[in-house]
Image (cartoon, rainbow, N blue to C red):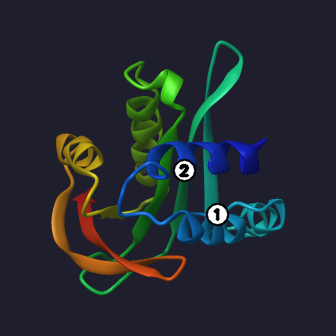
């Protein structure tokens, strides 16, 4: 279920963007969302998945990684918001905000002082969502989508 949810929400979010070549999308998605890869991530004690349901269907998910950091992130006990996606049919129904709130709660309860993330430079809707939730830009990094080295904004929020 998680592999299918991760695959379909990422595809819906980015496949139609003109900057994403179909072969780069397929290459990345085969690696990132295979059942084997998701199983490895689930087995990692520092990786936590949160799943949102609406109408008894998986509506979205978040992936957070404890103790992950990157150059430019200023924190003693950081936590990365590695993914936050919802199905297109549930956009505007509070799924993303509820997941975000649950991530903040997890981070606070576990003593993390900063939550950080990377968001694609060509995803202004997500950037606005994160800014609304108290994140601020602190740098940039490369996100490798197949053969395409894309630029993500690094954002962080003090907890």
Q: Quadrant of residue 125?
A: top left
Picture quadrant where residue 53 is located: top right
Residue 155 visible in the picture: yes
Q: Is 35 displayed left or right of 87 in the figure?
A: right
Q: Residue at x 54, y 77 (%)?
A: 146
| Relative side of 61 to 88, left or right | right
Q: Tell me how far mark 1 sits from mark 2, CA to CA.
A: 8 Å
The residue at 44%/42% (across/down) is 105
Which residue is under mark 2?
Answer: 10
The secondary structure type at the circle numbered 1 is helix
Secondary structure at numbered mark 2: helix
Q: Residue at x 50, y 83 (%)?
A: 147
Tags 1 and 2 touching, CB below 8 Å: yes
Circle 2 packing at 10 Å, graded few (<14), some (14-19), many (20+), is some
Quarter of the picture holding the C terminus: bottom left
Say above or below: 119 vs 133. below
- Label 1, residues with CA under 10 Å away: few <14, some 14-19, many ≥20: some
Residue annotated with mark 1? 29
At a point 28% along the width and 53% down the height, the residue shown is 123
Q: Relative to 38, is 110 on the left or the right?
A: left
Residue 3 location (% of width, % of height): 74, 51
How far across and down, in percent of the image, does residue 62 sit?
53, 47
């Amino acid at each position: 279920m998680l592999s299918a949810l991760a695959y379909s929400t990422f595809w819906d979010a980015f496949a139609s963007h003109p900057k994403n070549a179909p072969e780069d999308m397929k290459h990345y998605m085969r690696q990132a969302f295979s059942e084997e890869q998701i199983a490895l991530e689930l087995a990692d004690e520092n990786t936590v998945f949160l799943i949102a349901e609406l109408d008894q269907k998986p509506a979205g998910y978040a992936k957070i990684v404890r103790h992950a950091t990157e150059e430019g992130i200023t924190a003693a006990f950081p936590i990365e918001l590695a993914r936050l996606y919802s199905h297109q049919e549930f956009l505007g129904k509070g799924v993303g905000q509820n997941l975000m709130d649950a991530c903040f709660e997890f981070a606070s309860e576990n003593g993390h002082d900063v939550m950080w993330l990377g968001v694609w430079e060509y995803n202004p809707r997500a950037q606005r969502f994160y800014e609304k939730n108290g994140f601020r830009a602190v740098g940039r990094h490369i996100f490798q989508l197949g053969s395409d080295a894309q630029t993500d904004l690094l954002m962080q929020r003090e907890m």
